Image (spheres, rainbow, N blue to C red):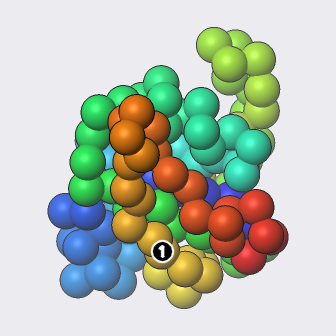
Amino acid sequence: MIFKIATAADWAEAERAGAFHGSAHDKADGFMHFSTASQLAETLRLYYAGQDGLVLAAVDEAVLGAAIKWEHAPSRGEDFPHLFAPLPLSAVKWTHRLSRDAQGTAVLPEMVFAGG
């Protein structure tokens, strides 16, 4: 399972369109950014600090086929999944609206770490 973070507005558009075409950042980079469960907290801290109205989508990587590529991100020293195609909503297993705790940290649902 890999994970996509999106604004609620972008995700609502994806639901209308039947596929997610990425954020402005994804489009500028030419691919869609994803994270693994172990990468999510740091991704949220670095790129989504203070943002509300975020949706977390759990995606079945196997459904994406050859369009998903694992690439090294020197800034983080890790390999990340990148999608070089629109995300079909049929690959999404669940979505969850993220909330923040009293310190402003995004609260990840237990489902992230339960493997499904």
**How many numbered discs?**
1
Label 1 Cα crowd, 10 Å radius (few <14 / some 14-19 / many 20+)? some
Quarter assignment of residue 40: top right
Q: Which residue is found at the position 19% from the left and 62% from the top?
A: 9
Quarter assignment of residue 39: top right
In the picture as drawn, the residue positioned furthest to the front comes out as: 102
Give SS at disc 1: strand
Q: Which residue is found at the position 67% from the left and 66% from the top?
A: 110
- Quadrant that contains the C terminus: bottom right
Image x and y of residue 113, in percent: 76, 61
Q: Which residue is found at the position 47% from the left and 80% from the top?
A: 89
Left or right: residue 88 versus residue 80 is left
- Quadrant that contains the N terminus: bottom right
Between 105 and 84, the one nearer to me in the picture = 105
The answer to whether residue 22 shows anywhere in this view is: no
Image x and y of residue 83, in percent: 58, 53
Residue type of the residue flagged with mark 1: Thr
Left or right: residue 3 versus residue 44 is right
Task: Name the residue carrying label 1.
Answer: 95
Image x and y of residue 93, in percent: 61, 81
Left or right: residue 3 versus residue 48 is right
The answer to whether residue 103 shows anywhere in this view is: yes
Between 85 and 4, the one nearer to me in the picture = 4
